[in-house]
Image (tube, rainbow, N blue to C red):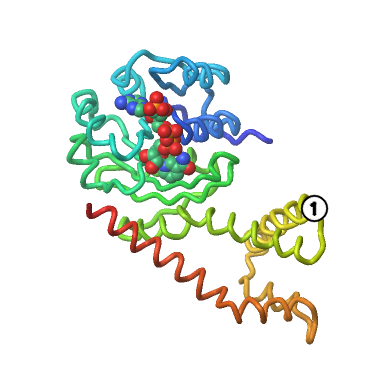
Amino acid sequence: MAATAALDMFKLGFIGAGNMAESIARGVAKLGVLPPSSIRITHCRTERRLVFESFGVKILETNAQVVDDSDIIILSVKPQIVKKVLLELKSFLSEEKVLVSVAAGIKLKDLQEWSGQRRIIRVMPNTPAAVGLAASVMCVGEMATKKDEERVTSLFNAIGKIWTADEKYFDAVTGLSGSGPAYIYVAIEALADGGVAAGLPRDLALGLASQTVLGAAAMVNHTGRHPGQLKDAVTSPAGTTIAGIQELERGSFRGTLMNAVVAATKRCQELSQT
Ligand SMILES: NC(=O)c1ccc[n+]([C@@H]2O[C@H](COP(=O)([O-])OP(=O)(O)OC[C@H]3O[C@@H](n4cnc5c(N)ncnc54)[C@H](OP(=O)(O)O)[C@@H]3O)[C@@H](O)[C@H]2O)c1
């Protein structure tokens, strides 16, 4: 893959060197957004340190050292321990640094209160970050600058696409792009089962189902055409595709997907209140 021109040089640290941190660090290093030597992590477990070390990331001893030696700090620990970790790091943070949180459900105001920091950006990525196809959304805290936003955009563009939205949309973002991959896994499994029911071998059916979902998503993204237009273009009168779509409509396919997003959004709202 061609290297992307670096916007500028800065030091990036991760607090919580788990799956999401690894996806971001690998994407950033692979696309040349930053050299791996500009990325630093710490971890109590050797195997996690070795994973990051294997592609050139600098390994430090403590979370405090990571904060001290970074311009942008991505907080990527589990949401349950965000408060504890931020309270511990509060005295090492300052307004020269940008705090970026990917912790699901943790609001800017809480991040601000626990860290004492106002230069904060909150990002909600999703699991396809692991294969460079994340759909991420960020909201920007009051003291974060345009440059901070650009830098964070460049980091999350390295693992997919990123949009900016007001924080009030974050529960719905969770309901759509956060939970969405699971809806599509169910859809791929169901399409494959349909193929098997229609006589296809299982492996062929699963490969065709997942590649078809990938291809359809790429058609929407690359052509910029509305999915309704793309659907109309492949449904000939009395043809096979419209017969399939009629069955989808009988099964309330669209309404079911809409309800799934709304139900997940409501559940996210409930969880953030407890
Ligand atoms: N994975 C995703 O696709 C995804 C999507 C959206 C948002 N997120 C958010 O990203 C965050 C991380 O998720 P993840 O999937 O990457 O989880 P993860 O793989 O469990 O990563 C968290 C890492 O933090 C480490 N850790 C635990 N306590 C720590 C401490 N006090 N200081 C520093 N590190 C500590 C954990 O080590 P141990 O394993 O040894 O405990 C683990 O390696 C979560 O807040 C999640 O909501 C993830």
Is residue 150 visible from the viewing direction of this image?
no
Question: Residue 199 is drawn in which quadrant?
Answer: bottom right
The front one of 253 and 40 is: 253
User: Is the residue 74 above or below the residue 145 in the image?
Assistant: above
Is residue 230 visible from the viewing direction of this image?
yes
Secondary structure category for the residue under label 1: helix
Q: Crowding near pointer 1: few (<14 within 10 Å), some, many (20+)?
A: few
The residue that mark 1 highlights is 204
Check disc 1 and give the amino acid type.
Leu
User: Is the residue 133 above or below the residue 261 in the image?
Assistant: above
Decide if ligand 1 comes within 8 Å of the CB at mark 1: no
- Residue 256 spot, x, y in % from top left: 51, 72
- Left of 49 or right of it: where is 70? left
- Left of 105 or right of it: where is 224? right
Ligand 1 picture quarter: top left
- Residue 90 spot, x, y in % from top left: 20, 28
- Left of 142 or right of it: where is 70? right
Quadrant including the N terminus:
top right
User: Is the residue 72 above or below the residue 153 in the image?
Assistant: above
* Residue sitting at x 19%, y 30%: 87
- Residue 261 spot, x, y in % from top left: 44, 65
* Residue sitting at x 67%, y 55%: 214
